[in-house]
Image (cartoon, grey):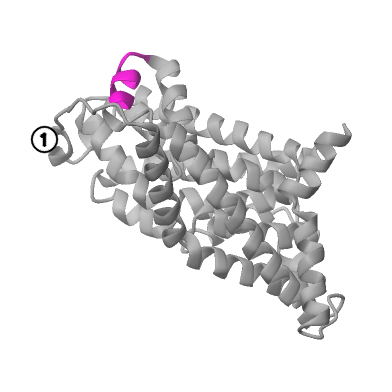
Amino acid sequence: MFVFQWINTQLLKMQWLSDLIKLLVENVFKLNVNERVGGSVHFFIYDVVKIFILLSVLIFAISYIQSYFPPEKTKKILGGFKGIKANLLGALLGTVTPFCSCSSIPLFIGFTSAGLPLGVTFSFLISSPLVDLASVILLASIFNWKIAITYVIVGLLLAVTGGTIISKLKLEEYVEPYVYGNKSVDIEQEELTVKERIEFSKEQVIAIIKRVWKYVLIGVGIGAAIHNWIPESIISAVLGQDKWYSVLVASFVGIPMYADIFGTLPIAEALVLKGVGLGTVLSFMMGVTALSLPSLIMLKQVVKPKLLSIFFGIVTAGIIIIGYSFNAFGYLFI
Protein backbone atom coordinates (compact mmCIF):
# COMPACT_ATOMS: atom_id res chain seq x y z
CA MET A 1 0.00 0.00 0.00
CA PHE A 2 2.84 2.39 0.88
CA VAL A 3 4.58 1.70 -2.45
CA PHE A 4 1.37 2.31 -4.42
CA GLN A 5 0.76 5.53 -2.47
CA TRP A 6 4.31 6.69 -3.21
CA ILE A 7 3.93 5.91 -6.92
CA ASN A 8 0.61 7.75 -7.06
CA THR A 9 1.87 10.80 -5.14
CA GLN A 10 5.41 11.17 -6.47
CA LEU A 11 5.29 9.66 -9.98
CA LEU A 12 1.76 10.51 -11.11
CA LYS A 13 0.76 13.57 -9.12
CA MET A 14 4.45 14.62 -8.98
CA GLN A 15 4.29 16.18 -5.53
CA TRP A 16 8.06 16.69 -5.74
CA LEU A 17 7.52 18.89 -8.80
CA SER A 18 4.82 20.90 -7.04
CA ASP A 19 7.16 21.51 -4.09
CA LEU A 20 10.02 22.44 -6.40
CA ILE A 21 7.93 24.95 -8.34
CA LYS A 22 6.61 26.38 -5.09
CA LEU A 23 10.21 27.15 -4.10
CA LEU A 24 10.79 28.70 -7.54
CA VAL A 25 7.71 30.92 -7.32
CA GLU A 26 8.37 32.06 -3.75
CA ASN A 27 12.16 32.46 -3.84
CA VAL A 28 12.83 33.51 -7.44
CA PHE A 29 9.59 35.25 -8.46
CA LYS A 30 9.00 36.51 -4.88
CA LEU A 31 5.30 35.59 -5.02
CA ASN A 32 3.10 33.99 -2.37
CA VAL A 33 1.47 30.81 -3.72
CA ASN A 34 -1.44 31.34 -1.33
CA GLU A 35 -2.35 34.57 -3.11
CA ARG A 36 -4.00 34.94 -6.52
CA VAL A 37 -1.02 35.84 -8.67
CA GLY A 38 1.40 33.44 -7.00
CA GLY A 39 -1.19 30.67 -6.98
CA SER A 40 -1.90 31.18 -10.69
CA VAL A 41 1.80 31.11 -11.60
CA HIS A 42 2.33 27.95 -9.53
CA PHE A 43 -0.75 26.25 -11.03
CA PHE A 44 0.31 27.13 -14.58
CA ILE A 45 3.98 26.08 -14.39
CA TYR A 46 3.27 22.92 -12.37
CA ASP A 47 0.46 21.64 -14.58
CA VAL A 48 2.23 22.44 -17.86
CA VAL A 49 5.47 20.71 -16.85
CA LYS A 50 3.65 17.74 -15.30
CA ILE A 51 1.40 17.19 -18.33
CA PHE A 52 4.26 17.38 -20.83
CA ILE A 53 6.45 15.00 -18.80
CA LEU A 54 3.68 12.42 -18.44
CA LEU A 55 2.51 12.91 -22.01
CA SER A 56 5.98 12.37 -23.48
CA VAL A 57 6.63 9.21 -21.48
CA LEU A 58 3.19 7.74 -22.09
CA ILE A 59 2.99 8.52 -25.81
CA PHE A 60 6.44 6.98 -26.30
CA ALA A 61 5.36 3.76 -24.53
CA ILE A 62 2.00 3.59 -26.31
CA SER A 63 3.58 4.28 -29.71
CA TYR A 64 6.14 1.54 -29.16
CA ILE A 65 3.28 -0.93 -28.56
CA GLN A 66 1.36 0.53 -31.48
CA SER A 67 4.32 -0.11 -33.81
CA TYR A 68 3.37 -3.79 -33.69
CA PHE A 69 -0.08 -2.99 -35.12
CA PRO A 70 0.18 -1.09 -38.43
CA PRO A 71 -3.13 -0.14 -40.14
CA GLU A 72 -3.03 -3.17 -42.47
CA LYS A 73 -2.70 -5.59 -39.56
CA THR A 74 -5.37 -3.73 -37.62
CA LYS A 75 -7.84 -4.01 -40.50
CA LYS A 76 -7.23 -7.76 -40.70
CA ILE A 77 -7.75 -8.19 -36.97
CA LEU A 78 -10.98 -6.16 -36.95
CA GLY A 79 -12.23 -7.94 -40.05
CA GLY A 80 -12.20 -11.26 -38.22
CA PHE A 81 -14.87 -10.24 -35.70
CA LYS A 82 -18.60 -9.62 -35.96
CA GLY A 83 -21.32 -7.93 -33.89
CA ILE A 84 -20.68 -6.45 -30.47
CA LYS A 85 -17.27 -8.17 -30.27
CA ALA A 86 -16.19 -6.22 -33.34
CA ASN A 87 -17.57 -2.97 -31.87
CA LEU A 88 -15.74 -3.61 -28.61
CA LEU A 89 -12.51 -4.30 -30.47
CA GLY A 90 -12.96 -1.11 -32.51
CA ALA A 91 -13.50 0.88 -29.31
CA LEU A 92 -10.48 -0.73 -27.64
CA LEU A 93 -8.39 0.10 -30.69
CA GLY A 94 -9.37 3.72 -30.17
CA THR A 95 -7.83 3.66 -26.69
CA VAL A 96 -4.36 2.89 -28.07
CA THR A 97 -4.51 5.47 -30.86
CA PRO A 98 -3.79 8.88 -29.29
CA PHE A 99 -5.66 10.91 -31.90
CA CYS A 100 -7.95 13.91 -31.58
CA SER A 101 -11.37 13.71 -33.24
CA CYS A 102 -10.19 15.39 -36.46
CA SER A 103 -7.15 13.19 -36.97
CA SER A 104 -9.25 10.08 -36.27
CA ILE A 105 -11.41 10.75 -39.33
CA PRO A 106 -8.81 9.74 -41.97
CA LEU A 107 -8.51 6.36 -40.22
CA PHE A 108 -12.30 6.18 -40.14
CA ILE A 109 -12.30 6.64 -43.94
CA GLY A 110 -9.58 4.00 -44.34
CA PHE A 111 -11.43 1.43 -42.24
CA THR A 112 -14.73 2.09 -44.02
CA SER A 113 -13.19 1.90 -47.49
CA ALA A 114 -11.50 -1.36 -46.47
CA GLY A 115 -14.95 -2.88 -45.96
CA LEU A 116 -15.13 -2.90 -42.17
CA PRO A 117 -18.69 -2.62 -40.77
CA LEU A 118 -19.87 0.96 -40.34
CA GLY A 119 -20.74 0.40 -36.68
CA VAL A 120 -17.21 -0.78 -35.91
CA THR A 121 -15.65 2.29 -37.50
CA PHE A 122 -17.98 4.56 -35.51
CA SER A 123 -17.05 2.75 -32.28
CA PHE A 124 -13.44 3.60 -33.14
CA LEU A 125 -14.34 7.19 -34.06
CA ILE A 126 -16.10 7.77 -30.72
CA SER A 127 -13.48 6.04 -28.60
CA SER A 128 -10.29 7.41 -30.16
CA PRO A 129 -10.55 11.07 -29.05
CA LEU A 130 -12.55 10.25 -25.92
CA VAL A 131 -10.42 7.61 -24.24
CA ASP A 132 -6.76 6.71 -24.56
CA LEU A 133 -4.20 5.15 -22.28
CA ALA A 134 -2.33 8.42 -21.78
CA SER A 135 -5.49 10.20 -20.62
CA VAL A 136 -6.12 7.43 -18.07
CA ILE A 137 -2.78 8.09 -16.38
CA LEU A 138 -3.29 11.86 -16.55
CA LEU A 139 -6.78 11.53 -15.06
CA ALA A 140 -5.36 9.44 -12.25
CA SER A 141 -2.62 12.03 -11.68
CA ILE A 142 -5.21 14.79 -11.31
CA PHE A 143 -8.09 12.95 -9.61
CA ASN A 144 -7.72 9.29 -8.60
CA TRP A 145 -7.67 5.80 -10.08
CA LYS A 146 -11.37 5.17 -9.42
CA ILE A 147 -12.36 8.15 -11.54
CA ALA A 148 -9.80 7.35 -14.25
CA ILE A 149 -10.84 3.71 -14.65
CA THR A 150 -14.55 4.51 -14.48
CA TYR A 151 -14.12 7.21 -17.13
CA VAL A 152 -12.51 4.65 -19.44
CA ILE A 153 -15.28 2.11 -18.82
CA VAL A 154 -18.11 4.56 -19.55
CA GLY A 155 -16.21 5.94 -22.56
CA LEU A 156 -15.86 2.45 -24.00
CA LEU A 157 -19.50 1.71 -23.18
CA LEU A 158 -20.58 4.83 -25.07
CA ALA A 159 -18.39 3.88 -28.06
CA VAL A 160 -19.66 0.30 -28.20
CA THR A 161 -23.30 1.33 -27.70
CA GLY A 162 -23.08 4.08 -30.33
CA GLY A 163 -21.43 1.79 -32.85
CA THR A 164 -23.92 -1.00 -32.19
CA ILE A 165 -26.93 1.29 -32.66
CA ILE A 166 -25.52 2.66 -35.93
CA SER A 167 -24.84 -0.90 -37.08
CA LYS A 168 -28.42 -2.00 -36.30
CA LEU A 169 -29.89 1.00 -38.17
CA LYS A 170 -28.16 -0.06 -41.44
CA LEU A 171 -27.00 3.42 -42.40
CA GLU A 172 -24.35 2.50 -44.99
CA GLU A 173 -26.23 4.39 -47.70
CA TYR A 174 -25.63 7.64 -45.79
CA VAL A 175 -21.86 7.42 -46.21
CA GLU A 176 -20.58 9.49 -49.14
CA PRO A 177 -20.04 7.19 -52.17
CA TYR A 178 -16.43 8.27 -52.71
CA VAL A 179 -15.48 6.73 -49.34
CA TYR A 180 -16.39 3.25 -50.57
CA GLY A 181 -14.75 3.95 -53.91
CA ASN A 182 -11.47 4.91 -52.24
CA LYS A 183 -10.23 1.34 -51.94
CA SER A 184 -7.02 0.82 -50.05
CA VAL A 185 -4.26 -1.59 -51.02
CA ASP A 186 -2.84 -3.75 -48.26
CA ILE A 187 0.93 -3.77 -48.40
CA GLU A 188 2.74 -6.17 -46.16
CA GLN A 189 4.94 -4.10 -43.86
CA GLU A 190 8.42 -5.31 -43.06
CA GLU A 191 9.09 -6.22 -39.44
CA LEU A 192 10.62 -3.24 -37.64
CA THR A 193 13.80 -3.49 -35.62
CA VAL A 194 13.94 -2.30 -32.02
CA LYS A 195 15.87 0.76 -33.16
CA GLU A 196 13.18 1.56 -35.75
CA ARG A 197 10.41 1.13 -33.18
CA ILE A 198 12.19 3.53 -30.82
CA GLU A 199 12.63 6.02 -33.66
CA PHE A 200 8.94 5.68 -34.56
CA SER A 201 7.96 6.27 -30.93
CA LYS A 202 10.16 9.39 -30.73
CA GLU A 203 8.58 10.74 -33.92
CA GLN A 204 5.10 10.13 -32.48
CA VAL A 205 5.98 12.00 -29.27
CA ILE A 206 7.27 14.98 -31.26
CA ALA A 207 4.29 14.97 -33.64
CA ILE A 208 1.68 14.78 -30.89
CA ILE A 209 3.41 17.36 -28.68
CA LYS A 210 3.53 19.73 -31.67
CA ARG A 211 -0.19 19.19 -32.19
CA VAL A 212 -1.38 19.56 -28.61
CA TRP A 213 1.02 22.00 -26.93
CA LYS A 214 -1.06 25.11 -27.59
CA TYR A 215 -4.24 23.42 -26.32
CA VAL A 216 -2.43 22.34 -23.17
CA LEU A 217 -1.21 25.90 -22.56
CA ILE A 218 -4.68 27.34 -23.21
CA GLY A 219 -6.31 24.71 -21.02
CA VAL A 220 -3.89 25.23 -18.15
CA GLY A 221 -4.27 29.00 -18.48
CA ILE A 222 -8.06 28.72 -18.24
CA GLY A 223 -7.70 26.30 -15.35
CA ALA A 224 -5.41 28.71 -13.48
CA ALA A 225 -7.90 31.54 -14.03
CA ILE A 226 -10.83 29.45 -12.80
CA HIS A 227 -8.88 28.20 -9.80
CA ASN A 228 -7.56 31.55 -8.59
CA TRP A 229 -9.62 34.36 -10.10
CA ILE A 230 -13.23 33.32 -10.71
CA PRO A 231 -15.27 33.34 -7.48
CA GLU A 232 -16.79 30.02 -6.48
CA SER A 233 -20.20 31.68 -6.22
CA ILE A 234 -20.21 32.51 -9.95
CA ILE A 235 -19.22 29.00 -11.00
CA SER A 236 -21.77 27.46 -8.61
CA ALA A 237 -24.50 29.70 -10.04
CA VAL A 238 -23.94 28.19 -13.50
CA LEU A 239 -22.51 24.72 -12.90
CA GLY A 240 -23.30 23.99 -9.26
CA GLN A 241 -24.29 20.47 -8.26
CA ASP A 242 -27.72 21.73 -7.23
CA LYS A 243 -28.46 23.02 -10.75
CA TRP A 244 -30.41 20.47 -12.80
CA TYR A 245 -29.21 22.01 -16.04
CA SER A 246 -25.46 21.98 -15.23
CA VAL A 247 -24.77 18.78 -17.19
CA LEU A 248 -26.67 20.09 -20.22
CA VAL A 249 -24.75 23.37 -20.18
CA ALA A 250 -21.40 21.60 -19.78
CA SER A 251 -22.17 19.11 -22.57
CA PHE A 252 -22.97 21.79 -25.14
CA VAL A 253 -20.60 24.58 -24.10
CA GLY A 254 -17.60 22.52 -25.21
CA ILE A 255 -18.87 21.88 -28.75
CA PRO A 256 -17.54 25.13 -30.31
CA MET A 257 -14.13 24.41 -28.76
CA TYR A 258 -11.44 22.21 -30.27
CA ALA A 259 -8.96 20.58 -27.95
CA ASP A 260 -7.50 17.22 -27.05
CA ILE A 261 -8.42 15.69 -23.73
CA PHE A 262 -5.00 16.83 -22.51
CA GLY A 263 -6.08 20.45 -22.88
CA THR A 264 -9.37 19.93 -21.05
CA LEU A 265 -7.90 18.15 -18.01
CA PRO A 266 -6.51 21.30 -16.30
CA ILE A 267 -9.91 22.99 -16.75
CA ALA A 268 -11.60 19.93 -15.29
CA GLU A 269 -9.22 19.97 -12.33
CA ALA A 270 -9.98 23.62 -11.57
CA LEU A 271 -13.75 23.11 -11.88
CA VAL A 272 -13.75 20.16 -9.47
CA LEU A 273 -11.70 22.18 -6.98
CA LYS A 274 -14.39 24.89 -7.22
CA GLY A 275 -17.07 22.37 -6.25
CA VAL A 276 -18.52 21.56 -9.68
CA GLY A 277 -20.05 18.08 -9.84
CA LEU A 278 -17.87 15.32 -11.24
CA GLY A 279 -20.51 14.37 -13.83
CA THR A 280 -20.75 17.97 -15.03
CA VAL A 281 -16.97 18.16 -15.46
CA LEU A 282 -16.76 14.84 -17.32
CA SER A 283 -19.63 15.91 -19.60
CA PHE A 284 -17.65 19.03 -20.49
CA MET A 285 -14.54 16.98 -21.24
CA MET A 286 -16.47 14.51 -23.40
CA GLY A 287 -18.30 17.28 -25.26
CA VAL A 288 -15.04 19.03 -26.16
CA THR A 289 -13.21 15.90 -27.27
CA ALA A 290 -15.95 13.89 -29.01
CA LEU A 291 -18.27 16.57 -30.40
CA SER A 292 -16.07 19.54 -31.24
CA LEU A 293 -17.40 21.67 -34.10
CA PRO A 294 -14.27 21.26 -36.30
CA SER A 295 -14.53 17.46 -36.11
CA LEU A 296 -18.25 17.56 -36.96
CA ILE A 297 -17.47 19.76 -39.98
CA MET A 298 -14.84 17.27 -41.13
CA LEU A 299 -17.15 14.31 -40.56
CA LYS A 300 -19.81 16.02 -42.68
CA GLN A 301 -17.45 15.67 -45.65
CA VAL A 302 -17.65 11.86 -45.44
CA VAL A 303 -21.19 11.16 -44.19
CA LYS A 304 -24.59 12.56 -45.12
CA PRO A 305 -26.62 14.82 -42.78
CA LYS A 306 -28.90 12.03 -41.50
CA LEU A 307 -26.00 9.86 -40.33
CA LEU A 308 -24.20 12.88 -38.89
CA SER A 309 -27.36 13.84 -36.95
CA ILE A 310 -27.80 10.30 -35.62
CA PHE A 311 -24.14 10.16 -34.56
CA PHE A 312 -24.43 13.54 -32.83
CA GLY A 313 -27.68 12.54 -31.10
CA ILE A 314 -26.36 9.21 -29.83
CA VAL A 315 -23.11 10.66 -28.46
CA THR A 316 -24.84 13.69 -26.93
CA ALA A 317 -27.47 11.54 -25.21
CA GLY A 318 -24.74 9.21 -23.92
CA ILE A 319 -22.67 12.09 -22.54
CA ILE A 320 -25.68 13.59 -20.77
CA ILE A 321 -26.67 10.24 -19.22
CA ILE A 322 -23.10 9.67 -18.06
CA GLY A 323 -22.96 13.19 -16.61
CA TYR A 324 -26.14 12.88 -14.56
CA SER A 325 -25.13 9.39 -13.40
CA PHE A 326 -21.76 10.62 -12.15
CA ASN A 327 -23.40 13.58 -10.40
CA ALA A 328 -25.82 11.24 -8.67
CA PHE A 329 -23.19 8.72 -7.58
CA GLY A 330 -20.05 10.85 -7.64
CA TYR A 331 -19.55 10.41 -3.89
CA LEU A 332 -18.51 6.82 -4.61
CA PHE A 333 -15.43 8.05 -6.49
CA ILE A 334 -14.09 10.66 -4.07
Q: Which residues are magenta?
A: 73-82
Can you tell which quarter of the image residue 303 is in? top left
Position in image of residue 294 (x %, y %) = 37, 59
Residue 54 within the segment the image draws in magenta: no
Quadrant that contains the N terminus: top right
Number of callouts: 1
Question: Is 14 located above or below residue 82 in the figure?
Answer: below
Query: SS at mark 1?
Result: helix
Depth check, front residue: 202 or 121: 202
- Residue 54 can be seen in this image: yes
Depth check, front residue: 98 or 276: 98
Q: In the figure, is residue 279 to the left or right of 314?
A: right
Q: Residue furthest bottom?
A: 30
Q: Residue at x 61, y 59 (%)?
A: 249
Q: Residue at x 24, y 36 (%)?
A: 110
Position in image of residue 25 (x %, y %) = 78, 77
Position in image of residue 308 (x %, y %) = 33, 44
- Residue 314 can be seen in this image: no
- Residue at the spot of label 1: 181
Q: In the figure, is residue 266 to the left or right of 159?
A: right
Quadrant that contains the C terminus: top right
